[in-house]
Amino acid sequence: MTLRIQVLGPMRAWLHDEPLLLGPPAQRAVLGLLVLAGGQPVGLASLIDALWGDQPPASAVNILQTHVKRLRRLLEPGRAPHSRSEVLPYLGDSYRLGVPADQIDIMRFRRLVRHAADGGETAALTEALALWQGQPFADLPLLAEHPRVLSIVVEHRAALGRYGAAMLAAGAVDRAISAFEEAAAAEPLDERGQARLLRAYAAAGLRAQAFTTYHAVRRRLADELGVAPGQELTAAYQEILDEDSRAHVLTGPPTAADRTVPAELMADVPLFTGRAYELGELDRLTIAPEPDTSAIVVVSGTAGVGKTALATRWAHRARGRFPDGRLYIDLRGYDQEQPVSPSAALARFLRSLGLPGEQVPADVEERAARYRSLLDGRRMLILLDNAASVDQIRPLLPGSSDSVVLVTSRDRLHGLVVRHGARRLELDVLRREDALALLRRLVGEWVTAETGAAEALAAQCARLPLAVRIAAELVHLRAPVALAEVVGELADHRRRLDLLCTGDPRSDIGVVFSWSYRDLPPDAARMFRLLGLHPGTDVDGFGASALLGGEEATARECLELLADRHQVQRNGDRYGMHDLLRAYAKDLAVRNGEVDLPRRVLEFYLHTAATAMDVLYPAERDRRPRVPRPAGALPALNDGTALTWLDAERANLVATAVHAAEHGQAWYPVQLALVLPRYLESGGHYADAVTLHEHALRAAESVPDHRSAVHLRINLGVVAIQQGRYAEASAELQRALELAHEVGDDSAGVRALGKLGHVYQWQGRHPEAARMLAGAIALARHTDARGTEARGLGNLGQVRLRQGRYADAAEDLRASVALCRDIGDAVGEA
């Protein structure tokens, strides 16, 4: 078995190279804690303390055991029932993770760093740092402050420092700067790290940036610690001052030849924040993969994610690599204006390379040939911004290996990768800490004073740099209004788009989004709009097919096209979009008369959930409502896929239920809540269970549907029992019992009495428990529910044992066994 686990970044796992869905946050946290132990056993008490702190629920051990059981099922799908687990064995009162160290990224990271100390430092550190995909457990805030996680962050920072020093010694200044910047961003008050960064900037000729960095650190030290820079940082600063003085004496004004070198880059982006990893990747990707080939890199990503800003920042940092000049053109591939043709772009570049205008050929192929000739032997950067297609780029590629081409596009430009060997860097939204840092730099003291509101504002902007910058301007316009009030204004998605309107077509978030939407084929455009109406976070091909109302193949083609253009994000076989794009898509749908989620989507989720439950719990099929099969494509579920589907779609199931309840479609949340309780309870998904049942209950009472309401209240009582909230459970079940009597539903009455018996039993209130269970048995006999009667007798026997009423207990248990034999219930008999 090949099991790989990643924790350096979002937590991920693969079995035989197939990605695994690791379940809810608490379940992933259990696995994460075992990874952090490095193969050593972790006691139940330690796990419980890490998950719940000083206030664990009464059922903490049971919840923990459920998480482990489900993890074993995921990680060891072929393990025989009841056989010993090799991956998660139980040792006394502890669990241990039995995965080889080389299959866990943090263990490999540490091994490589140790190996670097023994020789071969550069190669080992390069490989180690390549494993880093972001903050450890980036998707598990529960573990963010765990001491061992904080230790990993320190180890990474130390490795960056060693790598930067090695690169600087080898003359690879750009790579050194990338490493030192990332380390400095992680620990802004580390003077030693900042001093190394200053020296690296100086070595690259970026003295202005070194001075800016020094003064920013000096202010931060004064503001946050009340101290002046120490000896090491001051010495680095003085070295740069001394070098500047010498340079001023030895150099004269630039020559005419210097002034003829093209320098067409736009000004560097003010207050550029974060992106240390991506800048380092551009350093790596812009080195030709093999001799005599050009380095071509495509930076792709959704609108407003900062592709141009990243490319511009990197180009300014790396300009020392391109002594023969830097060419730049905005190809306007997504503007409202006409995109720049290859012919026009070539004419401009030829003039930039010194060719007089009257000598520029008229034919596009002749222009391309002359362009390649002028580039031959020159070390240049060609930055092609906002490209829409491969055809727009291909004539602008150099013919020699001396120059680097950097392209930004919302499209993945597969043809450029396949035919020309381009390498791709896909740009995601800012990391949480970088989005907050950018907001802090833009709006200042508001962020420090209102941290929670700042985090909410960054989330409302989907951590898109463009949106964060617009929102910062809105904060300034609203001053001195509190940041929390601005967050409140932006809470409504549609109003948010209006508030983030700038009036400038190049910075208005809605206009920028529209440039990508307008050229979509009809089916893909409709898919985009309908995704805005979907209340969940993502869909698979079958969910998209239900949304579109057509063939699954058509739906998947639309999703792939949208993913290629970064209008949705692909994660395995699922597709989603960030909140701002969703708001824009929903606004388009409403304007197009598509005002609500199609009923066929609800029918798809309900039927597939019922099918999954029938596969997992066939013996309980008669207790669940029968759901008709809807039209359209449906996934084929079996023992191996039913639970996976439920886990993947749980958030969508709850979200669609809430949506339907709020939009007058009571049938859906009611039936869904009666279909799913066993899955939600057994998986420990208590918060989802409560949300679903509370909305379903309000929906049932609004119709009114009193019989369903009774069972929903019982289900809520069961969830409260499993969370140890016995008083709440008792009140809910008592109300359910009263309603059962009112509507004459004896089966519901039996359930309510039985569950009340359990509550009193677990509270040690044995007389009340015995009374409730006796009532349940009597009502079961009245309705000829012999299986329920047998279970009630067994439970009553257990209660009487605890009361010391051994003769009565023996009589109840014998009666239960006899009844089980009579009805063929082997499990109950055992």
Image (tube, helix red, strand yellow):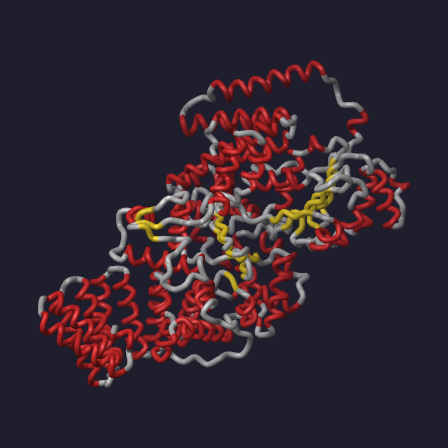
Q: Quadrant of residue 519?
A: bottom right
**Number of numbered markers:** 0
Question: Is the residue 343 above or below the residue 588 in the image?
Answer: above
Q: 33 or 172: nearer the eye? A: 33
Horizontal relation, residue 385 to residue 743: left or right: right
Where does residue 373 sit, x and y in percent of width and height? 85, 40
Question: Is the residue 293 above or below the residue 68 in the image?
Answer: above
Q: 583 or 183: nearer the eye? A: 183
Residue shown at 31% from the left, 47% from the top: 43
Q: Quadrant of the C terminus?
A: bottom left
Q: Is residue 732 visible?
A: yes
Where does residue 69 sit, x and y in percent of width and height? 37, 59
Q: 497 or 628: nearer the eye? A: 628
Q: Quadrant of residue 57?
A: bottom left
Residue shown at 60% from the left, 20% from the top: 240
Horizontal relation, residue 298 to residue 758: left or right: right
Q: 86 or 738: nearer the eye? A: 86
Residue shown at 87% from the left, 40% from the top: 357
Where does residue 152 sit, x and y in percent of width and height? 44, 38
Horizontal relation, residue 6 to residue 622: left or right: right
Where does residue 464 sit, x and y in percent of width and height? 55, 48
Residue shown at 63% from the left, 17% from the top: 243
Q: Is residue 478 visible?
A: no
